[in-house]
Image (cartoon, rainbow, N blue to C red):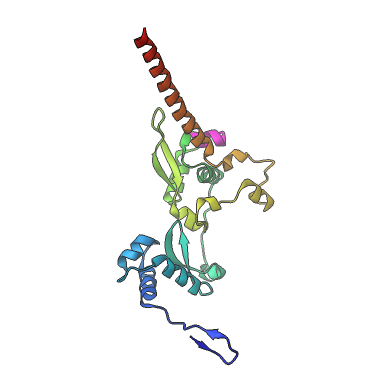
Amino acid sequence: MKKTKNNIISFPSDITQEEREVEAILFAAEEPLELDTIGSRVSKKKNILKTLEKLKKHYLNRGINLVCISNKWSFRTSDKLSNLMSQQKSVQKKLSKAAIETLSIIAYNQPVTRAEIEEIRGVAFGTNTLEILMELNWVKPHGRKNTPGKPLLYVTTDDFLSHFNIQKLSDLPTVEELSSAGLIDSDNIDTSIFGTGTFYKEKQEEKKENIYSNIDELLKSTLETNDK
């Protein structure tokens, strides 16, 4: 580094060999990469996260930015310049009301079954509603719920986070935030759509507790029988 005539420190703009390698790996990648994947491709493993953070800062005010979404890194066009990427002729397809509500319920209540989605919406929906969301790769099956019939559970994907520019699910706006921004009318909308998933988790925990209590009762009755 050197000092200018105004006595201001000027740091060199050159980047290190490791930074160049990480930059090249991310530029050539067809999809966002995890930290371990990047680390496995560089010639010398050092502090990859520190290198990524430095590159992120380097690209902060440029045409492309280095972003991390759901613990995966990739280069993306700067949000400030996204209007330059729009085509002169574009075709927009709007999601149906059922699809929007279904996506919202899954995002805020995941993992959730089809029956639970319909219970929250208060109405059944066509099979193509979930198919449309899965074709967009915003929603995917995620195992089965341990209840009679073993229904499929649905969750959102990394593409959902990427499309809506959300780094993690906890960044989703709350009902109060959506209402104050004028995006929803909280007085005329069923706020159960914007649950947190704790309801189902609490039910599962309660079920586990009931199982243990039954075991305790069974052991107690067995011991009493042996004493007699």
Residue drawn at x 46%, y 25% as measured from the top left: 210
Rendering coords of residue 20 (x, y %): 38, 75
Residue drawn at x 46%, y 36% as measured from the top left: 114
Residue drawn at x 68%, y 45% as measured from the top left: 185
Q: Is residue 121 magenta?
A: yes
Q: Is residue 85 above or below residue 126?
A: below
Q: Is residue 67 magenta?
A: no
Rendering coords of residue 206 (x, y %): 49, 29
Q: Is residue 224 above or below residue 136?
A: above
Q: Nearer the viewer, residue 182 or 130?
A: 182
Counting every numbered tag in the picture gives 0
The residue stretch that appears in magenta: 116-124
Does residue 154 show up? yes
Q: Is residue 187 above or below residue 212?
A: below
Q: Splitting the image into 4 quarters, where does residue 214 fall?
A: top left
Does residue 124 show up? no
Quarter of the image that includes the C terminus: top left
Secondary structure of the magenta portion, mostly?
helix
Residue 93 left/right relative to 223: right
